Amino acid sequence: MSIEELDDELELEEKERVISDTPILRIIDLTKKFGELIAVNKATFDVYQGEILGIIGPNGSGKTTLFNMISGVLKPEEGEILTKKNENIVGKSTTKIVKKHKIARTFQIVRPFKLLQALDNVTIPHIPKGLQSPKTLKTRSLTSLLEVDMGEKKNYPAAILPHGDLKRLDFARALATDAEVLLLDEPYSGLSVEDSFRITQLIKNANQEKGVTIMIVEHKLKLLANLVDRIVVLNQGKIIAIGTPEEISKNQVVIESYLGKEASSIVSS
Amino acid sequence: MSTNKSNTTNDTMKKIKDRISEVNWSYHWDRIKDKGGYIVFVLTFIFIKQIPYLPIIGNLIQDAQNRNIIPNIETLNSLFIHMVILLIFIVSWDLLSGYSGQVSFGHGFFLGLGSYFTVYYINGLTVNGRALFDGKSENFINIGFTTIDLNVFTAILVGATVSAIISILIGLITLRLKGTYFALITLILPLIALNLAKNLWEEYTGGDLGLQTRRLVKQEDKELSQIVWEEYYFYLIIMFISIGIMFWIAKSRFGLALQSIREDELAAKASGINVRLYKLFAMGVSAFFAGIAGGLMVQSVGSPIGVVNVGAFETQTSFTPVIYTILGGIGTISGPIMGTIILTIAIYYLALGLIQYPMIELRAIAIILILILRFQPRGLIKADKQLKNGLYIGIFMAILISFVEELVNLPQLLATWFDDEGIFGLDILNIKGRLIFYFFINTIIGYFAPDFIRWARLKTWGVWPSLPDFDPPK
């Protein structure tokens, strides 16, 4: 069963999505160099509140580096990352970016707390949320786990869970930080068709019901085309195009450098 | 029709209410059984003095004491005081290294700091002829079962606090270090301290001879046999409070956050955990309780005065918690407790059973540690059921055989079978040597017996119970 058929079968009630004109993140002239290599070269784009933004590009084009800079893992050489309140978050620690500026992320290769149970894995982002009774903490973490449909596996150590479950656990952990912006680094990598479908539903739910702004780095254009509002295309560290999926699929520069003619026909169809 | 329906619903509601109001004894019994280890541990430590006078097992214990199977009451006292202080130290190491994953090979440094600053607070410290702080006079206070010197008790807390502050300062420097590099830094700390204390600052530390100070419990007006028990019970209270706090930290959300740092530091940061703060917190708490253990260690020598010397900074002290915790099970609280109890008792028996080769018990422990790391890396607390059963059978049978050995002249037989040299240096003429021998043999039998019995049964009897003929459905 293909994804399109699954999509038709389980069509959710589409709420009217609100994408405001005010940017929640403004990325201005962001540059990162690894020695001589320029990984990201003067990237400039806005992320609007409530949208789903896709970031594509060939291998080594700087997509994950961009995410690492936004989430505070790497420090850029130049440029600014401005939040909604016009605060520059460049150079701040990951913890502060998650807690104060509400920008959470997942990882390309899943990083669960292996020896901890699934429930404890999602309890950890709830811990630094100020004073709360143990009962509240447990309720909150159980809610987070149930949101990604893993209630029956709450006592399993993460080390024995399959890859699809770990991807959802990672997603739950990022969502549990009460994030306003969610950076998903290849959420579909290594997933089966059903698991991909589940992740798509989770992303749509988070976006529609919680109003979370989502940025996705992904290779699978098929999945992105039906999901995202805009796509940013990176090539060798430079942004070569920004636009809706249809616009991107018709953009000559993108077709030449990355997509190829076959793939562009898939997106436009 | 409608009344009938309402009746049935009423009945079912009543049944449900009855079921809820019933006390589920089996559930409560299971919960008690799960905590059985803790209950036995607490009761043994509290009633160790009264155990020989208990109604049923008291006679057996006294008999065993007469046969030298169990040490007499004075030895038990010194053994348990040693164990109580060691427990605080070793659990504090596990909180830092087992939970937050910062493996420290120099925990003796914090122990030594606690010891020395306890003594300095009581005696006063004079540097270059200028008194940094004066000594404290005696201030006795009666706390029911004993009379303690409040100033000495304060001194222990002060020593622990100093130890915690210094550990946090070291933690600030080593924040970015992980794994081996952190371990190397902590390994060097006690060596530096040992060198300084022995050579440069000998006038302040007393060198190998050490410094002397007052004791915690009032020594006058009482017999020594009573004082040592008063001391034991006071240390026991401190131990229960200390381990209780550490147990609560480990089980609470703080422990969970520490574990998340151990598992994956970047993922913990990305979940909003303040990694620096939690690392410093773990170091501070761990060093505080190591300092308390150090303050009590000053008092643990069997003499009317407290003594502190540079022994705490020796490498052996720093490796003690590593060995004991790995044997019990790292990353749990019950693991180091079990490891400490087992190894303290094991070292006592090995030291007396292997009396021909002095200090060889430490080599024996090293061999045990290698075997544990190879076959049960998660420690004895999470060991295979087969091994656990083997050890239980070994202990039980060793004690049983040592009770009945006289009836079959086993000691004489063993002495004729093996000459006076003994087996692997075990002193066969000594009851302790024989105990170790019986334990060793019976553990091996207990470990392989279930497999052997199953094999023998399948060879001779077949499957038991023999099943009736069974026709598969067509």
Image: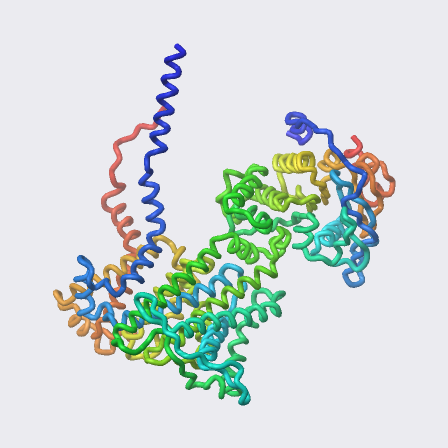
Residue lying farthest left? B407
Residue depicted at 61% across the width and 65% down the height: B175
Q: Residue at x 38, y 54 (%)?
A: B384
Residue B347 x, y percent position in the rendering: 33, 71
Residue B186 shows in this picture: yes
- Residue name at image x 84 percent, y 43 percent: A241
> Vertical placement of B47 versus A17: above or below?
below
A41 left or right of B122 in image: right
The vertical placement of B170 against B379, above or below, is below
Q: Is residue B348 left or right of residue B296?
A: left
Q: Which quadrant: the C terminus of chain A?
A: top right
Q: Quadrant of the N terminus of chain A?
A: top right
Q: Measured from the top left, where is residue A145 in percent x and y?
A: 56, 41
User: Residue at the location (64% across, 27% down)?
Assistant: A10
Query: As displayed, is residue A12 above or below residue B87?
Result: above
Report the number of numbered marks: 0
